[in-house]
Amino acid sequence: MCGIVGIVRNRDSKFDPSDHMAEVLRHRGPDENGFYKDKYCSLGMRRLSIIDVEAGHQPIHNELETIFSVFNGQIYNYKSLRRDLISKGHILKSSSDGEVIPHLYEEYGENFVEKLEGMFAIALWDSTLERLYLYRDRFGKKPLLYTVRNGDFLFASELKALVHDVALKSSDVDSNSIESFLHWGYIPHPHSILSGYKKLQPGHRLLFHKGSIHVEPYYKLSFTNSSNSSSNNQNLLLEEFERLFSSAVEKRLVSERPLGAFLSGGIDSSMVVAKMTQLVAEKIKTFSIGFDDVAYDESSFAQIVSQHLGTKHHLLVISSEMVRPTFESLFDHYDEPFGDSSALPTLLLSQLAANHVVVALSGDGGDEAFGGYERYLYMRRVQSIRGLLFLMGSGFTRTIFSALPKQSRMSRGLNRLSNLKDLKSIYQGFMFQDSHEKILDLIHDHAVSRTSKTFNSFFMNEAKDLDWEYQSNLYDIATYLPDDLMYKVDIASMANSLEIRSPFLDHHLMEFGLRLPRDLRVKSGGKAFLKIAASRYLPPEIINRKKMGFGIPKRKWIKNELKSIADDVFFSNDSYIYHWIKKDETVRRYRHFVETENSDALIWSLMCLEMWSRKWLTGTR
């Protein structure tokens, strides 16, 4: 695991910030640094040594020293790739996973990335052709950002390395990204919070050559509407799952440094830990977070799993004294506005684990691969009922409405269904922090809505032929997974020099989950197939319990532990947020939040936006 940086200079430039950029990322790789520099290109890295600790240095090169690469992540199938390369005459001098990269490029060209299994952000410089290639893994586990400045092309694992020498001002902020953030609570790729700085999309490669940038996908996930299963088919699928799941976990156990696992007590992380106990002789170290508010506390379930599997469990209960300093520190690490409140416990969980291990496995990706979100079931039901109403005809539907009491639950429900025009409006209801119209009303300038444009492009083009549950599942994998979940975990873990590996994000396992028959994916509660598979590993009280998610008591915290911060954010005339949003309406919403029991996701996100601004906008206002 590393932090990587680099620059390709234009013909007249002597600019080389790679040393300073790499130093900004020391937290990602505290063990050593490494650099390659020639007339036009500089590559740099900070290394967290995990595989071939003694000899696995970077940058890495081919035999002729014409191809150089740095990378962040892990290549899980490196041993088989290494054997293949050696059989073809390549000379590899270490046992590190990264050394296969320049040799694979030498052997197979720019499409070599298709042979990799793992999580990665790769930079490769072909000095003969003067071409720089960037690659990001299939599901966006590892981040990679880039920009062009005065004709020089720069890239880095984190935005903070790209702006280390820039005094940012509010005018540097992309106002469309503010709008996206207020909708989602994060900023979807390829955009960043800053104008002119972009994220390489998951499953894409970038070529920079002679001043031009070309980005294209090398991997695209897809699935078709599926039918129901048979009992015989189910048994075969269980056997295939067991093979794929065992392989995915086993590959992620390769490490020369201490290894453990996050354990929430949910089905995904519990299955990962269960499989680890089958494959590892010694006791597995497991880690979880608890809350003093029972509505959010899952720690008792994690304890049940730990006792069932015999792990060495470590629990941290978040006290009220920990809330404010942790919240204030969030944007020392998160270099974009980020409104997912579970970033706070994820940072504390990573700190806990990093005191004991260097590598931890997690259950991330299980919901996306196996239909774990209840919204998928809701989408299926709504689409079915709307289809039935359509077949009955508008006249029959009006007859039903007229026969029902106007304020009855059924009447209200049918009326709501008839007014839901499409999948987009339903998905927005689940995922947006408020309605599209209310968010636009809050913003000073919203001439162009990037959110609507991106949304329409996906649902009207890329996934238009799929049923609604599958469309929303694919959109989650395309955006929510990399831009919220993966960003959250990467920043929190790497801030503590901790590597997180996620077996459910193995692309073979993800593809398997998405091609499952419909009745084995989404039933009441979700993850029907995974629950059947889990019965081999886990007690019923874990398999059958209601899904909680990684939520926090943020309403309570804002009104108590974080109250003085919130008051300062919303009442101060100097708050940065009022560069982009209307103060009167924002203050009204905050007062309503404080005086009632209503929840308002935007309140937390606006606090995060302000805290980010105070940390990173250091230039003159």
Image (cartoon, rainbow, N blue to C red):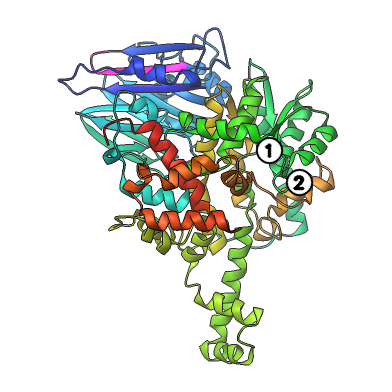
User: Do we see residue 222 in this rendering?
Assistant: no
Badge 2 or badge 1: first in the primary sequence: 1
- Whether tag 2 and tag 1 are in contact, CB under 8 A, the answer is yes
For residue 32, the mark is: none
Instruction: Determine the residue positioned at 69% across, 42% down.
Output: 268
Q: Look at 31% across and 17% down and name the residue there.
A: 42
Residues packed near mark 1 inside 10 Å, few (<14), some (14 to 19) or many (20 plus) = some
Query: Which span is picked out in magenta?
Result: 38-46
Q: Is residue 42 magenta?
A: yes
**Where is residue 621 shown, x and y percent of the image?**
27, 37
Q: Is residue 197 left or right of residue 519?
A: left
Would you identify the image quadrant in which residue 201 lies? top left
Q: Residue at x 64, y 31 (%)?
A: 349
* Residue that label 2 marks: 533
Q: Position of residue 550 (x, y in %)?
A: 64, 43
**Residue drawn at (46%, 28%) of the image:** 332
Q: Is residue 328 visible?
A: yes
Indicate whether 198 appears above or below 353. below
* Three-letter code, disc 2: Ala
Mark 1: secondary structure = helix
Are there few (<14), some (14-19), or many (20+) residues within 10 Å of tag 2? Answer: some
Q: Position of residue 446 (x, y in %)?
A: 31, 57
In this view, 548 is above or below 125: below
Residue placed furthest toward the left: 12
Nearer to us in this view, 158 or 230: 158
**Label 1 sits on residue:** 245
- Quarter holding residue 314: top right
User: In this rendering, would 328 be left or right of 318?
Assistant: left
Q: CA distance from mark 2 to mark 1?
A: 10 Å
